[in-house]
Amino acid sequence: MGNYKLTRKEAAESLNMSMRSIDRYIKAGKLRAKKKGKIVYVHGDDVSNIWWDTKSKNHIIITDSPKTEYVESSSSKKLVKKNDVDKLTKTFDSVYSDLRTQIDKKDEIIQKLSIQVWRADEQMKHSISVSEHNKSQMLLEESRGHITAQMSTLNEDKKSLEEELKNEKFDKRVLIVFVFILLAVSAYFFFKNV
């Protein structure tokens, strides 16, 4: 069986992990395992590699100069100056707070727009439909045309009535003048015979 000497339980105890974590490591391919009967054995070298990785993670190393500290990066497994990490953290915090502020502003704008859309929707519910509006516009135009026709007819009637009134006035004047002339002639003959 080679170096497959540790059971899952023994590997979990030596790594100070649960059995489920060991199963996850096996499933992820970080631990080689062989099954013999009902017992699963784990490769010893893989267990020691995982033990070494977990113990050395985020380990701080102080070099000769007392001001420079190095930290092992968890993503690249390289040593990075702690001051650089602090600067990056501050930069990240600054960018994060700026983004958070922008997101809050956009959320506020979205909320205002949602309220405006809701109000417009409510107004649309209480207003007439487009087809009803078009129908009323058409009826209005029809009534305007009808009113215009009636107005032109009334204007023609008014002109004809004004003409008739003028003619009647003229006729009355002529009649009055004729009556005066007749009275004058009859008065002349009356006083001439007397």
Image (cartoon, rainbow, N blue to C red):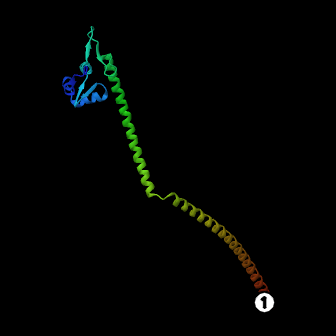
User: Which image quarter holds the N terminus?
Assistant: top left
In the depicted structure, whether residue 40 falls above or below residue 115: above
Which x, y percent locates residue 146?
62, 67
Tell me the residue that label 1 is attached to: 190
Q: Residue at x 26, y 30 (%)?
A: 23
Closest to the observer: 55 or 8?
8
Closest to the observer: 31 or 38?
38
Q: Quadrant of residue 150?
A: bottom right
In the depicted structure, whether residue 171 falls above or below residue 7: below
Q: Residue at x 73, y 80 (%)?
A: 176
- Say which amino acid is labelled 1: Phe
Q: Residue at x 35, y 33 (%)?
A: 100
Closest to the observer: 12 or 149?
12
Which x, y percent locates residue 179?
75, 83
Which x, y percent locates residue 139?
57, 64
Q: Residue at x 65, y 70 (%)?
A: 154
Q: Is residue 178 visible?
A: yes
Which x, y percent locates residue 36?
24, 28
Q: Quadrant of residue 161?
A: bottom right
Closest to the observer: 53 or 104?
53
